[in-house]
Structures are given as structure tokens and as C-alpha cells.
Amino acid sequence: MDLKLSAKHEALRAQIREFLKLHGHQSAPTIPGDRPNTALLAWQKLLLEHGYAGRTVPQHYGGYGAEPDVMEQHLIVEEFTRAGVALGIGNQGISMLVPTLLELGTEQQKREYIAHTLRGELVWCQGYSEPGAGSDLAAIQTRGVDDGEDFLINGQKIWTSTAHAADMIFCLVRTEPDLLKHQGLSYLLFSMKTPGISVRPLKTMTGRAEFNEVFFTDVRVPKHQIVGKRGDGWKVANATLKHERAYLANPGMLIQRYAEVAKLMQGKGLSGVPAIADPILMDRLMELQGRVLAQRCHGMRLLTLADKGQDPLLAGLITKLQGCEIRFQLSSLAVDALGEVGLLLQGSEHTRADGIWQERKGFDLGLVIGGGTAQIQKNIIAERGLNLPREPRAAA
Ligand SMILES: Cc1cc2nc3c(=O)[nH]c(=O)nc-3n(C[C@H](O)[C@H](O)[C@H](O)COP(=O)(O)OP(=O)(O)OC[C@H]3O[C@@H](n4cnc5c(N)ncnc54)[C@H](O)[C@@H]3O)c2cc1C
């Protein structure tokens, strides 16, 4: 690939740097499981106005309306990362549902939902997993029974991130119980305020309740709230999963995390000596530096393929597996580098860095599981990427 930037891209880079110099201090982070606060909503609005969020989303759906240009997108992520500035709201609605709707939604769905979602006003949750269906997602049992103008939904979802704070859900239900399991699903959008929904929080090892159980009892959803065709939910669900896996393992985020851990280790430790002076911790940092840089190069390779309009195939599949594992190892290293106080969560009087690394370590371990576990990713790489034989599967 040609690493030299064109004049157009050089100009964009200068523009981003100027923007960050003027406005970077206004940035606000996304807190997993929470609704965007006022500061984050204002930051997102500014990013949308300047084309640093929703860049290629058409203007009539609330985006900036730029032509797709992978190098521009890369430059934005790179410059924000270099400046340590948060790139607006990262949530399931913006990163997963919006691209799904752009690809497969009806015109009415696009107009009704995309702009509000991009602005952070409409918060979504993802209703896929059930107590008996996680890795084997197509085994879901939540039923959507045909009832005239509506589907009547009954069943239970689990591990539903942000359901307690969400306005809407994109939900996978079984509408055709007589068909084979992958063929009988439909993908529905509905309000979390619809009568018959109850949400029960699940507390995680971060000490917070970021996800939930969600119960549906005779929940009435109009049929036009379906994305794609009835019975075609597996295809729509996979379109969303593709975006989820890219969102969870963004290489820009890894570089930012690596820089934070390196800085932490250079500071004074508990004993007054920086953690980086410890040869074992230093060795772990160096190994992770190599892996982060490899991910960055890999990201550029994917970019080159996208630029040429080529399908990345195997190269695209390893991103989630590698990215989420490295992210967890970086947080684990930070906790170890902090010594015994690294284990303390926010709120303890002895905590350092406000307990952020212990919380991140717990959360990042979840990302190795969420969106498809590491083992499932390896199966996908083996079967779809390397054409190895499929593992035995139940017939229906
Ligand atoms: C932080 C977090 C957030 C999440 N958010 C959401 C959300 O918002 N919405 C949602 O719907 N779901 C969400 N999930 C659920 C997530 O998608 C599931 O946890 C995941 O798909 C695994 O399913 P499971 O937990 O049922 O584990 P299981 O499928 O029961 O797997 C248990 C173990 O067996 C292994 N295993 C299973 N099948 C195979 C196989 N064929 N080959 C090899 N190993 C296998 C798995 O890798 C795992 O180690 C979230 C999970 C986490 C951790």
C-alpha cells in the first residue's frame, strides 16, 4: 500500500488537528451501560456537525453525507487517538444498528430512527442471547406469534447490555417455529416501554450492572417493525454481528490503551519505583506493544483491501479475536503494575487511577465473550477462513 497521503488527505489531517486543538477539551467518554450525559450529547452534536461522527451517513438521515473514503475514516480515528480524545458515542445503536438499517432497513425505519440514534437521543439494546442460546444463537426460543397486524412476543433474553437505560430494542425472535432453526427467525424493533416488558439487572465483576435479563409477556409489536423479511432474521442478525465485531476490536482503541498503560508504568509505583523497572512487567509491556503494532498494521491491510473493493475474508475474521484478547491483556497488565491496590474498585480510599483499571479488566474480559466468544471466533476462522471441516451440528 502507498503510505503517502494525498493532498486531500493531508488537508483533512490539518483540519482534524485544528478541530482537536480548539474543541478537544470538550470531549466526554461513553460510560458502558449508561445513557449519554449532557456533556457527551453536546460533544456528539459537535462531531456530527464537523463530520467526525456519522460521516458517511446521508444528510437526510442525520449524518454528514460525505462520500465513503476509508483513508478519511482512518485519519479521523488516528488523529483522535493520537490526541487521546474520545470519538463520540460508541454504543450498540450507533455502531451496530445504524449500519444494519442503512443496509437492510425500510425507508421509513431509516427516517424514523437513524438521526435520533446518531445524536445519542435514542438508546438501543440488543436482544439476541437467551438462557439456552448464546454461542448457538439460532437456538433462540422467544416466540413471535402472528396475531393479525402484530406479532405477540413471549420469552426471555439475557445478558442484554444497557436494557435498563434503553429506549428501544433490536430483537431476534422465532416467528416460524415449523421451519429449520436458522430459517424461522425475524428481527424486530420495538420500544422498551411496550407493555409486557420487564427488566432485571445483572451485576458484573466490574461492580456495576451493565447488563440485564429481559422478560416478554404478550408484548405486542406491529408487523411493520420488522427489519428484512419475515423468517430472514438470521441474515439481518449476522449483518449486525459483523458490525459488532469490528466495533468491539477497534485498533485505534488498542493504541490508545497501550499508550495509557505505558504512561502508567513509567509513573512512580507503590514502592516509589516505576513498574517499568520490573523486568517481568517490562517484558509483558514489550510483547503487548508488538501485538498492538501488529494489529495496527493488520488494520491498514484491511483498509487497503476495502479501498480496492476487495473482501478481506480470513483477514477480517481475526480482528475481533485478537483485538479483544489484547485489550484484556493490557488492562490486566495495568492492574498488575499497580500492585496490590490495582485490585481496588472505585470508591476505596486507597484506590489509584480511581479504580479504572480494575473495572476495565473486568469489562474487557466480558468483551472476549460478548459478540461471540474466542472459541466461537476460532471456529469461524477455521471453517469460513481456512475451509477446515465444519464441526458436527444438530440438525434443527
Ligand atoms: C459483556 C457482555 C455483554 C453482552 N451483551 C449482550 C447484549 O447486549 N445482547 C445479547 O444478546 N447478548 C449479549 N451478551 C451475550 C453474549 O453474546 C454471550 O455471552 C456469548 O454469545 C456466549 O454465549 P453464552 O454466554 O450462552 O455461552 P455458551 O454459548 O454457553 O458458551 C459457554 C462456553 O462454551 C464454549 N462453546 C460453546 N459452543 C462452542 C463450540 N461450538 N465450540 C467451542 N466452544 C464452544 C464457549 O466459547 C464458552 O466458553 C453479552 C455478553 C457479555 C460477556
Image (cartoon, grey):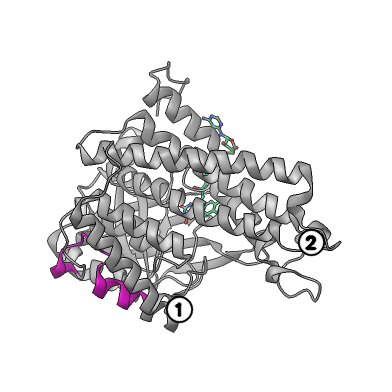
- Give the side of residue 208 with respect to residue 121, left or right: right
Closest to the observer: 346 or 228? 346
- Give the side of residue 72 with respect to residue 241, left or right: left
Q: Residues within 10 Å of mark 1 (few under 14, many from 20)?
A: few
In the image, is residue 283 part of the stretch drawn in magenta? no
Closest to the observer: 264 or 376? 264
For the record, the magenta segment spans 43-61
Determine the residue positioned at 39% across, 47% down: 246
Residue 20 at x, y percent in the picture:
38, 72
Q: Is residue 57 above or below residue 138?
A: below
Image quadrant of residue 61? bottom left
Amino acid type at image mark 1: His
Residue matched to label 2: 269
Residue 25 shows which numbered tag?
A: 1
Mark 1 vs 2, N-terminal side: 1
Image quadrant of residue 353? bottom right
